[in-house]
Image (cartoon, helix red, strand yellow):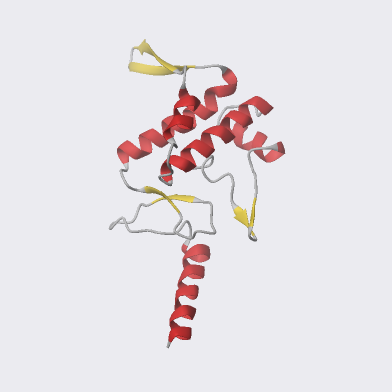
Amino acid sequence: MAVLNSAPVIDGTPTEQLGGSTGNEIAARFGGTGTPDELAHLRNARAALHGVIRGEDDAVEPLTRAVDGAVLVPETTDTGVRWQLDVPADEELAVRAVLAWSRAMEELPGRLRACANTECNLYLIDHSRPGKAKWCSMATCGNRMKARAHARRARAS
């Protein structure tokens, strides 16, 4: 979610958090180094994931490029099998982000989605019982969208 939500719209302006010191902090939080190449791979993976989640045409090809060449190698231990990711260091976080998306799609089908506010660029995992959550945050997007709908209804009557 940190990678998916690293390009928020703030005061109507898209921002980029996978660059500079913020990008370094995000990379470090997940075991990366924050090199320019690592952050570029993360941005490319994020763009591919955004496209796939939003159902855009031709979105799968960039996602395929993001994981191309990645290999999971089994390592047997006395507690079981652990899978090690074999990929160039600068690509590891991007591949791990794609693998995390894939796992979320398997374990929580239909629950990872884009915010219903078209002016927002954030994503959510719907943990609600009925699975009908629409907004990244009820406090911001939810209230804003409900206020707009109310204003439209008031103008129409």
The quadrant of the picture occupied by the C terminus is bottom left
Point out residue 35 in the picture as x, y percentages from the top left corner: 67, 26
Furthest residue in direction bottom, as rendered = 157
Query: What residue do we see at 55% from left, 16% from top?
Result: 88
Query: What residue do we see at 46% from left, 18% from top?
Result: 70
Furthest residue in direction left, as rendered = 130
In the image, residue 105 above or below residue 130: above
- Which quarter of the picture shows residue 100? top left
Query: What residue do we see at 51% from left, 69% from top?
Result: 144
- Which quarter of the picture shows residue 116? bottom left
The residue closer to the viewer here, 24 or 55, is: 55
Instruction: For residue 45, say whether it is visible.
Output: yes
Furthest residue in direction right, as rendered = 20
In the image, residue 53 above or below residue 135: above
Number of residue marks: 0
Query: What residue do we see at 42% from left, 33% from top?
Result: 60
Point out residue 5 in the picture as x, y percentages from the top left corner: 54, 46
Instruction: For residue 35, say whether it is visible.
Output: no
In the image, residue 89 above or below residue 142: above
Point out residue 42 in the picture as x, y percentages from the top left corner: 57, 32
- Which quarter of the picture shows residue 12? bottom right
In the image, residue 85 above or below residue 46: above
